[in-house]
Amino acid sequence: MPATRSRRKTVFRSRAQQCSFCHEPVDEDCCTLYGEAVQAKTFVGHYFCMLFSCGLNQNGDPDEDSLRGFSEKDVLQELKRGSRLRCSYCKGYGATVGCSRKTCNRKFHLPCGMKRDCLFQYYDEFGAWCPDHRPRQNLVPSQNSTDATCLICMNSLDPRPSVNIILTPCCRQSLHRKCVQEQASSAGCHFFKCCHCANKESFQQEMLVCGIYIPEKDAAWEQEPNAYSDLLYVYKQCDAARCMCPKGKSYSKNNDPNWEVVRCHVCGSKGVHVACGNLRRDSADNHQWMCTECRAVVASLASKRLGEQLLKSEADRVQSTTELCRVTRSQAEHSLAPKKRRVDEQAERSSIYDECNEEGKEEEALLGRSLGAKDDMLYSVHRRKSTVTALPRLDNVQLGYSSDVPSQSTRARLQQRNVKPCATVRAMVASVPPENSESKVILSISNKEDCLPG
């Protein structure tokens, strides 16, 4: 049988633990810039070098897989493909990162691209952009070029947006890219926000577009060992003016009926022994004690609260009194409205009556002048309505004489009755036959009830 030649598996690993993609050392400093080390039997590489490789897909779960979601087979195929690609900057092989612009043919290593001002976006499809095609900010800085400073490192800078200067979208403050990246690496995605206005949502979105890597982890100060050990300290010392414990003020024993230190339930920064404070258990079978300082503060707050309640009650009383007066006034006005209306109507009637009286006197005067000594008048008194209407002026009427004209005594009696004639007069003139050669004037007077006396 012919001898079979076994294929040797290519191992892309150098002697000094270099990255199989960018050939940079896999140490702590490089891992800060290029991501943590991902190591297998046949290769070792930076996490970001693997993410930005054009032909490598992350199909697994990056949190549960030791290779951060990459398969060893796919990584070896990508390394084989990159061995034929030359970097546009260092002219070395292994350039697996390419520009995201489809018409651009530039290939480069991740460290070479960072040194040549390429932009890497750490979200969505992890796009990489060469210096000619990288997106740029179109914001106007709020700072002047003379006094512009970075709010993180407090060093002066040029406020205009550039490769190394980033403007915040919320308040348009200019920051160093390096300072922003260090802040994001320390704060994590939960605490990373604008250092000027504390905006978080729009600030993080703009920083991702500008190529800032925001790790999905808790803040660095939250991960320090014993970072909150001071908060777990329990005060155990008797602060009584005269401690009666034979073992000293610092002695405390839980559930001891005499020498258990009970802390102040308000501040918790002072305590006293049960026996030294002569404490008794409450309804919940617990000891309650308050220090002198907290007692004074609580008393002042109680007095202040009492004063506010008194002022509020006084204001409510004044408001209720004012409202009651307003309601009473409105009710009085409403009850007096009919009386006032009747008074107004009576006054109006009186004025009308006076006007009618004046007009009647004028009509009587005109009638007297027209009749002269002999008054050929005919009064038709309508007793059914008890009204009398005054006569109009008869200047242009040719008056005749009739035998049924009232006498002088009748007219005197009518005047004594003080009849108030109205201004409306209807005159009816009847013509007598020619043989009598006399004209007879029939005057009908209709008076209103308001014009009668009484």
Image (tube, rainbow, N blue to C red):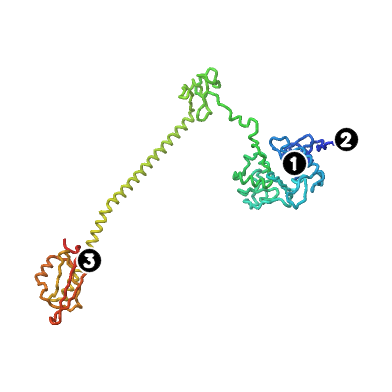
Lower position in the chain sequence, tag 2 or tag 3 = 2
Do the residues under discs 2 and 3 have CB atoms within 8 angstroms?
A: no
Q: Earlier in the sequence, mark 1 or mark 2?
A: 2
Depth order, front residue of 435/377: 435
In the rendered image, which residue does mark 3 sit on? Answer: 355
User: Label 1 sits on what residue type?
Assistant: Met
* Residue type for callout 3: Glu
Foreground of the two, 85 or 194: 85
Q: CA distance from mark 2 to mark 3?
A: 144 Å
| Element carrying mark 3 | helix
Which tag is nearer the camera, tag 1 or tag 2? 2
Which residue has dot 2 on it? 4
> Could you classify mark 1 by the number of other residues whose Cα lies within 10 Å: few (under 14), some (14-19), or many (20 or more)?
many
Residue at image point 60% right, 45% down: 199
Residue on which the image places disc 1: 50
Amino acid type shown at disc 2:
Thr
Residue depicted at x 61% and y 29%: 229
Note whether residue 246 is visible. Answer: yes
Q: Which mark is residue 7?
A: none
